[in-house]
Image: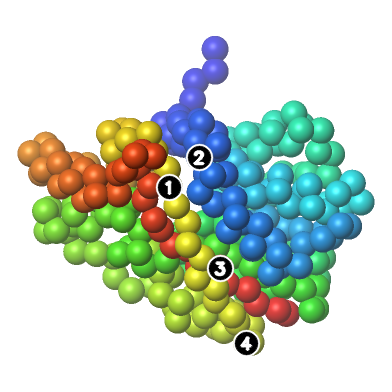
Amino acid sequence: MTTLTREQWERKETADWWSAAQARRRQIYGAATEMMLDVAAVQPSSRVLDVAAGTGEQTLMAARRVGPTGYVLATDHSSSMLNVAAEAARKEGLKNVETRVMNAENLALDADSFDAVICRMALMLFPNTAKALTEMRRVVKTGGKVAVIVHSALEKNPYHGIFGIAQRIGNIPPPAPGEPWMFALGDPGALEDVYKRAGFLNVPVHTVAIQRRFASTADAIHNRQNSVGDTRELMNRLTKAQRERAWVEFEEQLSRFEGPNGLEVPGEVLIGVGTK
């Protein structure tokens, strides 16, 4: 009988949660991901590196674009996540996808070996964002592009408003500038600055609207309460009474987006791109 360590269980739980939420993420980030691939100039026969690929929705989108003569390497620190991505590629019959466990800040790859590098919803979580982007720049060919998607500011994303509510109720200070968290690069200027520190010039940052759809406010709350990562960690810092108060207040805020078609919550992401 195989016994998993606590860390392995946590990684498996995270991978399972992300796998189950794939369809919802496609609905939310699909158009923005296509735009990221566009600005990264991903095209037939391209060699693409997907950094912090997770369960690989954007990996598969890139693989479809590059076609059978192209190649996509999906890297992540979590083997459980990459197993989900590899299985999804296998089921779809995509033979141009490879997965490897790898640290984003120390890519074990040759310089100038990819036509494009992409990174969706992960750069802001790296301990050293400039180092990660510097590594991405190193492995892309001269003239190649590195494109990322990150969350815009917290106030532009009411679905994540539970963070601000919990911080206020629990008197928890927000992360310090430079500390990794979901909204660390939410200011377009911050994203442009980290690109420039990594050696890129003339970095355009695009603001892209997204929308989350749920059957009801209750459905959205249930989804939020069962999420993993930052939300769970933050709520665990509150007392039971504080948690209950936070969820009630969050529900009140979300309900203003409910209408005849269910709950439609607006949001915003940033797409940055730099050329080597």
Identify residue for label 2.
24
Instruction: Write down the residue under mark 1.
Output: 212
Q: Is residue 61 left or right of residue 270?
A: right
Residue at the image point whose x is 89% and y is 46% from the top: 68
Q: The residue under label 3 is which amino acid type?
A: Ile
| Residue pictured at 35% horizontal, 59% vertical | 157
Mark 4 Cα-neighbour bin, 10 Å: few <14, some 14–19, many ≥20: few
Circle 2 or circle 4, nearest the eye: 2
Image quarter of residue 268? bottom left
The answer to whether residue 210 shows anywhere in this view is yes
Residue at left offset 24%, top offset 64%: 174
The residue lying at 31 percent from left, 43 percent from top is 259
The quarter of the image holding the N terminus is top right
Question: Is disc 3 surrounded by few (<14), some (14 to 19) or many (20+) residues within 10 Å?
Answer: many
| Furthest residue toward bottom | 202
Element type where label 4 sits in the image: loop
Q: Residue 241: x and y, percent?
A: 7, 39
Among numbered discs 1 and 2, the one appearing first in the sequence: 2
Q: Position of residue 123 (x, y in %)?
A: 52, 63
Question: Mark 1 and mark 4: span between their CA atoms?
Answer: 32 Å
Q: Earlier in the sequence, mark 2 or mark 4?
A: 2
Judging by the rendered image, the residue that carries numbered circle 3 is 271
In the rendered image, which residue does mark 4 sit on?
A: 202
Outermost residue to the left:
241
Q: In the rendered structure, which amino acid carries the disc numbered 2?
A: Arg
Tag 1 and tag 2, C-beta contact below 8 Å:
yes
Mark 2–mark 4 Cα distance, whole angstroms, equals: 34 Å
Residue 97 x, y percent position in the rendering: 78, 44
Mark 1 or 4: in front is 1
